[in-house]
Image (cartoon, rainbow, N blue to C red):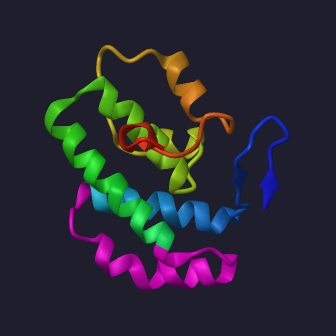
Amino acid sequence: MQVNPDSRFIFPQVSGAMKQFLVAMVKDEIVQPGNFESGKKHLKAYCENEILDYKALDSELRLFFGLLADYNQTKDPVLYHFLILQACNCLFDEAMFGLLPIVPPEEINPESFRRATSATDCGMVGGHLIGL
């Protein structure tokens, strides 16, 4: 695990192979909805090899796909920002998120994307909505 000295959050180190798998799996789900279920066996194996909590990552990815579905219907810039933050919880960094076929809303500020995907800003998504 890597600890960013400027942050209170701990980010697990994952291999390049797992990063590639995550990008491919999420791209596949975006292009062909319903394929996420078929990739779960491989996701679980990667999590075991990387010593990651499979159930937690599965839950975070489901939330990501739910946010993505809502964003695709509305193109709301606020949802886009939450989508970026949720990607951090799914072990995605800025480069990985940029590989996904997700079109940003017209009103998006590219600088806000860089801030949202920096290690210091990845944290609990929506926690303020429930009083955390």
Point out residue 73 in the picture as x, y percentages from the top left corner. Answer: 14, 38
Does the magenta portion include 52?
A: yes
Q: Residue at x 72, y 53 (%)?
A: 10
Does the magenta portion include 69?
A: no
Would you place residue 110 above or below residue 56 in this image? Answer: above
Point out residue 125 in the picture as x, y percentages from the top left corner. Answer: 45, 44
Q: Is residue 104 visible?
A: no
Quarter of the figure with the N terminus: bottom right
The span picked out in magenta is: 31-55
Would you place residue 119 above or below residue 65 in this image? Answer: above
Q: From the viewer's perspective, tell me whether residue 119 is left or right of residue 42.
A: right
Q: Is residue 44 visible?
A: yes
Prevalent SS, magenta region: helix
Q: Nearer the viewer, residue 71 or 19?
A: 71
Point out residue 122 in the picture as x, y percentages from the top left corner. Answer: 59, 41
Would you place residue 74 above or below residue 13 in this image? Answer: above
Q: Residue at x 51, y 26 (%)?
A: 113
Point out residue 78 in the picture as x, y percentages from the top left corner. Answer: 33, 27
Toward which corner of the image does residue 31 lie, by quadrant?
A: bottom left
Q: Residue furthest front?
A: 131
Q: Nearer the viewer, residue 13 or 101?
A: 13
